[in-house]
Image (cartoon, helix red, strand yellow):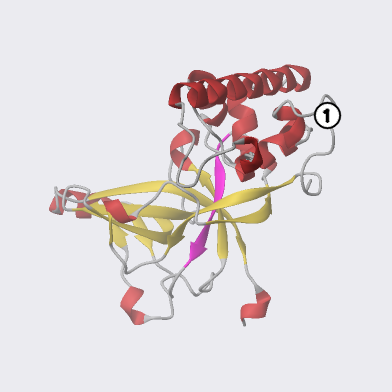
Amino acid sequence: MDMVGIDAGNYPLRQGQLPAFNSACAFATMRAMTRALVERIEERLEGLGKTAEGASREAGLSRDFIRTLQRRPDTSPKADNLGALATVLGCSVDYLLGRSELLGTPPAAPPVGEVMLPIRANVGAGPWLAVEEISDEPIGWAPAHVIPEYAAWPQWLERVQGDSYNRFIPNSALVHVVDTQAMGYEARHDDVVVVVRSRAQGAFIERTLKQVALTPQGIELWPRSYNEKWSAPLKLTEDLRADEDASVQIVGKVLRAYIDMQSF
């Protein structure tokens, strides 16, 4: 969202004097702007036959992005989030903000079927992060096609770090992930997945890539590395029984990997 400038020339102040800040007026103005924004969004949703949740996901945002605006009129969305939403709604940011009555051109419209997906995390065996170090905010954005077969569920990117999966996916590559919890995923043999392990009652988190192996003893999650350090599987059932303080979740299924050839 563009910053609104205040012309200091409109305030004939004496030296050292500042105008009083009327917080009630400022919040009322923000609420009015958000209500106008929501009205424009709802108008475009109806015109395009989209749902609030579907448009939010298509824009690479949280599924509740539009609903949060609807419920909380004091919300001030970020400029890049509005730009992504405007692209999905086929209009300009100026139109959504009520600064233009013309739909205009969507900002930096990508090729058909392509959007900027968020890079939500780094993924790689080894580092255990304290929960307070982990943010819900994306660590970056990259152009990627939403994969149609999985368009009903959230998709995002993760950046590979380290060598725990370097037989197939090298360090610094991006993996394209779909939300397994949203889609009601059941583990399948040979699937590549994002696994989150926690310990100390969830105080520390490790996020890794693994390949699923279904065995008579249960589910095994294998690293695929040339480094002998990463040569043993995580035996899901046994590990959970052995350590009641640990938890293991498959949080994403890897659909594709994007490799920057300039890094070689």
User: 75 left or right of 143?
Assistant: left
Q: Where are the magenta residues, as a range?
A: 153-160
Q: Position of residue 262 (x, y in %)?
A: 67, 79
Q: Position of residue 199 (x, y in %)?
A: 20, 54
Q: Residue at x 75, y 34 (%)?
A: 94
Can you identify the residue that label 1 sits on?
103
Q: Residue at x 55, y 26 (%)?
A: 30
The quadrant where residue 89 appears: top right
Q: Position of residue 213 (x, y in %)?
A: 40, 56
Judge whether residue 192 is colored magenta: no
The quadrant where residue 176 appears: bottom right
Task: Inspect this view and state whether residue 217 appears.
Answer: no
Q: Position of residue 61 (x, y in %)?
A: 57, 39
Which structural element holds mark 1?
loop
Q: Disc count in the image? A: 1
Quarter of the image that includes the N terminus: top right
